[in-house]
Image (cartoon, coloured by chain):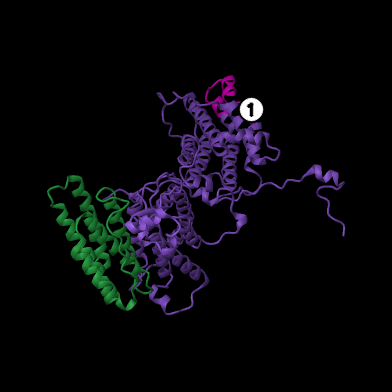
Chain colours: A green, B purple
Amino acid sequence: MTTTWLAPAAVLARYASGWDGLWTLLYAAGQATANLAAVPGADDDLSLAYAALDISFALSELEQGLVSFADAGVAVDLGPVELADRAAAVGVVDDLLEAAQSLIWHLCHEPSVGGAEVLSATRVALTVGSARAKVTGGAW
Amino acid sequence: MSAPELWPATYGDLSLRAAMGIQAGVSWMQNLPLEEPDLAQTAIDDFRDVLRALKEHLWVLLEFRRVDGILISATPDPRELVAVRLGEVLHEFVGAKPPWAWVGARISPSPWAVAARCVQAAGELMATHSDADGLPRTPDLDAVLRHPDSRAAGLAQVGDMTATLLGGVDHLALRAAQAGIAWPQVRAQLPDLSEARALARNVAGHGMAPTSAHLDDLTVANPPIRTGEPAAQFSDRMMRLRRTAWREATADHPSVETLKVYATLGIAVHAHALAFHGATPATLRTGTPLARPLVALAGRGRAWQGVARSLQNLRSTEPCEPEVAEDFAKVTGLLRTFAPLTGEQPELSSRDRRHLGQAIGAATAMTADVGRWNQATVTRMGRQRQLYVRAASLAGDAVTNEDAVVAAKLADRCVPADAAVVGAVNDLYVATAPKQTSALIGEQGLILRAAPLRIDNARAAESGRDPIARTQS
């Protein structure tokens, strides 16, 4: 996992920009969460399944007006993971989501952004925050 | 102090209150002094109101559009045929209520008036399940209200109430005359109703009247969510999720996000149901043998996991239905308190445990319905090209046949999901519901519609055999 998830996730978090970059971060985080949730024993309390749903909601919200539905961002799947790497994988997902939240904050403060876009981005940020709380176990 | 939470009335509640009202009305009419003609006239008016309500309820149960078919059918249901005749006889007696009848009308407090209102309310409860064209607004219209068993039970109840009420008509006439209403006037308002009584007895049938638990438990189409009691809230929200899943199956623009919520709900309901019975995920991994019902439960939970996984890469232009997301969040929150997946299970009294067990059992049954309707939704979305997938996520052999898909993969764009992808999701849905015997599945997918056995008389006559003769061995 160290070689297959950490490096590409770090690149994504560092270079993602604009609404399309936000979409890419969330798509990668969603796929990674779903991949981890599918590992037997990795999601006993279903927190990862709920987090994957939250991230899907965030992507859907983005696609309602902030990005083009047909060709937003770049679809990145970090690939499979093993149970032994669960803690590290959760850390990667959390890093991707944190980068997404940070990017939303920057995007909302750009002068060209309108009120409706700010509100939509805020809804995305809230959903991403909810997903982070679930992934890291802070939700319950 | 907050007001006590109202529980929505069920069809069974209203029927019971109507029966109690008829009984109390008979007692009221027999025992109270009707010296005043006005009081006697009120009793007659309320008596006629109950009969009118019962007559209108008969038509609701029979459905007007079916009446001609019942009358010309070669093999009608005997109870329905007599019910049509009873409706006609009662109509000759009480007529229809004019639309302006409510103007200046007083609300009578008599038990018969209460019974009439309960019968009317039962009809209105049923009416909430269909729209103005008679098309279903909920899955319960076909599965419950139009089910032959429910119809028979409803008609038998109405027949029973009508026969009981008509049993007191002569006594009411006598009391009215004693109170000072002239005999001709009494007879004009309370004529000989022996034919109606005989028909009502036939509609009720002999022996124990048929009953239908599904009909008795039926409530209005969209009852409010009870938020005071956790198990009640859980059941109400699950019911609403079930209704929305049914509605989505025929919606013009359903959302794959909604389907993802239902798939996660299916996982959660089954995981918590297993935990409720002592089989938490950690226990399952130890390989402890499970009871047969729990094995089936675990299998369906895994099937929902497969569905959730297969939906992960699918996208649609519509966002998730907000009500579904809200109900899902509440339901999963409640499930975590009822039967946590990790840690200690809560200590429950035997009564609470039974109550919760019923609620969770009903929820797993509902997910089976949800799975069938979600499968229909996916099929429709696939046919109408409303399901999309990022071409980048498609395997190489899935993109070589079409130039447009190859171009989309290179440019990392969305393409409509092809039949193979939709078919794979469909196959996974099949395992989310318990297997049903095909004989129990009717045209509507839910109802047993056993056609009467038809004997081909012409062919039997040609063969020179009695159509029901046994073969001599």
Q: Is residue B359 above or below residue B104?
A: below
**Percent position (x, y) of residue B176?**
54, 26
Picture coordinates of residue B77 (x, y %)? 66, 41
Q: Is residue B366 above or below residue B9?
A: below
Q: Nearer the viewer, residue B419 or B295?
A: B419
Count of labels in the image: 1
Residues shaded magenta: B173-193
Q: Is residue B36 visible?
A: yes
Q: Mark 1 is on which residue type?
A: Asp
The residue most toward the front is B403
Which quarter of the image is occupied by the N terminus of chain A? Answer: bottom left
Residue at the disc numbered 1: B192
What's the residue at 52%, 28% (across, down)? B44
Q: Is residue B349 magenta?
A: no
> Which chain is indicated by disc 1?
B
Determine the residue positioned at 35% across, 68% down: A35
Residue B230 visible here:
no
Name the foreground residue: B107 vs B314. B314
* Residue B174 magenta: yes
Which image quadrant is residue B164 in?
A: top right
* Observer-nearest of B76 and B445: B445
- Where residue B321 appears, as percent x and y from the top left, is 35, 49
Specify few, some or many for label 1: CA neighbours under 10 Å numbering under 14, 14-19, or 20 or more: some
Residue B141 location (% of width, % of height) = 51, 44
Quarter of the image that includes the C terminus of chain A: bottom left
Instruction: Report the front residue among B377 and B70.
Output: B377
Please, what is the dominant secondary structure of the magenta stretch? Answer: helix
Drawn side of residue B114 relative to residue B337, left or right: right
